[in-house]
Amino acid sequence: MIDTKPLHQTSTQVRRDVLRMVHGCKSGHPGGSLGCADFLTALYFHIMEHKPDFKMDGVGEDIFFLSNGHISPVFYSVLARSGYFPVSELKSFRRLNTRLQGHPTTHEHLPGVRVASGSLGQGVSVAIGAALAKKLNGDDKIVYALMGDGEIEEGQNWEAFMYAAHNKVDNLIVTIDYNGQQIDGSTQSVMGIGEDIEAKMIAFGWKVFRMNGHSFPEIIDVMERAKRQTGHGQPIFIIMKTEMGYPIDFMMGSHKWHGVAPNDAELEKALAQLPSNLGDY
């Protein structure tokens, strides 16, 4: 049995970072960042084989692409907390002429960032290209990608899904943050993709898993099972159920917090629900 207490401690601190980052610059996307904190913590601190001594080509290591780049606060926090750059740099989030811009970009040369993202619908395509490059180079490591469920509205994804299955890109694990919310409302009200995304992905030729994105035992179990299915001729798709704004009681489950920063009182109320002894930046 894996001791998940350290992961819980880290993800709690990551959530504190997220809230303080978006509050500090009065802009950003806290809802999805909070919802994906457990997944990205598990990925970087337990699942992936990666090197904070960053090299852009990622040869000989697992690599990750964030397609829904607007949740950059959680990505930056996890990168910093796992050693890619100083935690103190988180205070520069969304400031002019800094490396931590609102969406991850590459020209700032921030360690851990391999593609500019935030133009939604493109991350899976990039991840497929990287996975094919690993195959061509004889590199047996895995490519991971995270996308938002609102991105499914972009047609490019479905071309990418078809391409990956047709070309047996079986060193690729794509996870979708299935929280049912996007900036204008619920995903079902904006552009309903149907409840059975699993059936769609199976029909497109992918191996599909489901998991609760707020349970470390389940995340680790499903991700490890997914890893064991790589190399068997199919790309892998994981449907991760989360709550936007989790676990802050006044933020959960509403699209309101997709892209709104908490005010002073809201920040204090939220931080009180996230006790941590790991230390704020």
Image (spheres, grey):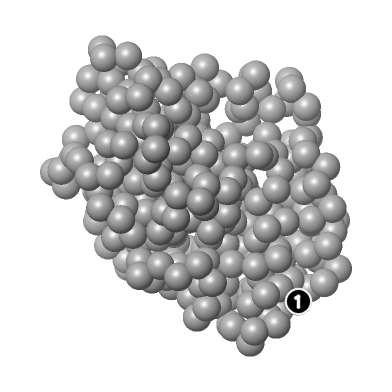
**Amino acid type of the residue that numbered disc 1 sits on in the rendered structure:** Gly
> If the image is split into quadrants, where does the N terminus sit?
bottom left
- Residue that carries the numbered disc 1 in the rendered image: 233
Residue 88 sits in quarter:
top left
Residue positioned 36% across, 35% down in the render: 93
Q: In this view, does 32 lie above or below 170?
A: above
Residue positioned 34% across, 46% down in the render: 77
Q: Among all residues in the image, which is located at the extreme bottom?
A: 138
Q: Is residue 199 visible?
A: no
Residue 280 sits in quarter:
top left
Q: Can residue 141 be seen in this view?
A: yes
Q: Which of 259 and 188 is in front in this view?
A: 259
In this rendering, position of residue 77 left or right of residue 272 = right
Q: Nearer the viewer, residue 16 or 250?
A: 16
Residue 163 percent location from the top left of the image: 83, 62
Residue 247 percent location from the top left of the image: 37, 31
Residue positioned 30% across, 25% down in the render: 24
**Mark 1: which secondary structure?**
loop
Residue 57 percent location from the top left of the image: 54, 72
In this rendering, position of residue 154 left or right of residue 100 = right
Q: Nearer the viewer, residue 183 or 122?
A: 122
